[in-house]
Amino acid sequence: MPAIIRTLDDSAAFAAMLVENNQRKDPDPIDQAQGFQRAIDEHGWTVQQIYEQTRIKTQVINARLALLKLHPDYQKMLRRGQLELNLAELMVNLDHNRQAAAVRVLTATSRKPTMAEFRRVITDLYQEQVAQEQQGTLFPELEQVWKEKLQEAEQSGKRARRKRLPLNPNILAPPRFKRNWWFANQMHDYAEQLRAAGFGEGADAIDHVVEMAIDCGILEADETQF
């Protein structure tokens, strides 16, 4: 069977290579980012044109391009699997000094921070960065603050938080919530416990919040259990 030889111009050849590289199983995100950046710099493509060639969602393309804002050391960590992609994506808007602080906080304890905890770390560091750029405002040593919070969380088994709400020690504490049951139902059950313990107004307030959250689509519930 005769072979069919196609001659591709530089742009078409590059497009074919880009598509092939991105069709691999679990492509390296930094390789993807560099390929997308090359498409923009050398071939003048837009993100939309990259999408049309690769069928990779524009949100993913933009997220990969943002990874190039990471310090080269953290790009290497991402390549080696020492830094998870979802955590790396949170760091991209920090300057390199604060990226370093974020990584040191991330590795400060044997228990890896949850996504929510690390997002709080990044938020604080970014707010500090913006304030410093705009106003020259100095913040407390956030890196040390968050290291201590994560160490406390590791010992207590609770999540690291910026700030906790003041609680009335006289009010019955809720039971430990279950992940595999409707949160609205669990809140209603807690309200019933409060009502039985004589905290009727608190129970009514919880039921009002639960009802509003269900109506707004924030919570779902098994209403047969109400």
Image: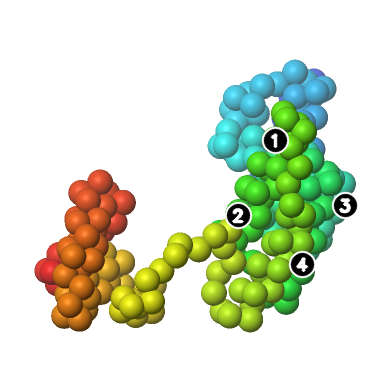
Q: CA distance from mark 1 to mark 2?
A: 15 Å
> Can residue 6 be spotted in the picture?
no
Tag 3: amino acid: Asp
**Is residue 205 placed above or below 75 in the rendered structure?**
below
Tell me the tag on residue 107: 4
The numbered mark, 1 or 2, whose residue comes first in the sequence reads 2
Helix, strand or loop at label 4? It is: loop
Residue highlighted by disc 1:
130
Helix, strand or loop at label 1? It is: helix
Residue highlighted by disc 2:
120
**Is residue 69 placed above or below 157 in the rendered structure?**
above
Q: Tell how many labels.
A: 4
Residue located 18% across and 65% down the image: 201
Residue located 38% across and 76% down the image: 169
Q: CA distance from mark 2 to mark 3?
A: 23 Å
Q: Residues within 10 Å of mark 4 (few under 14, many from 20)?
A: few
Tag 1: amino acid: Val
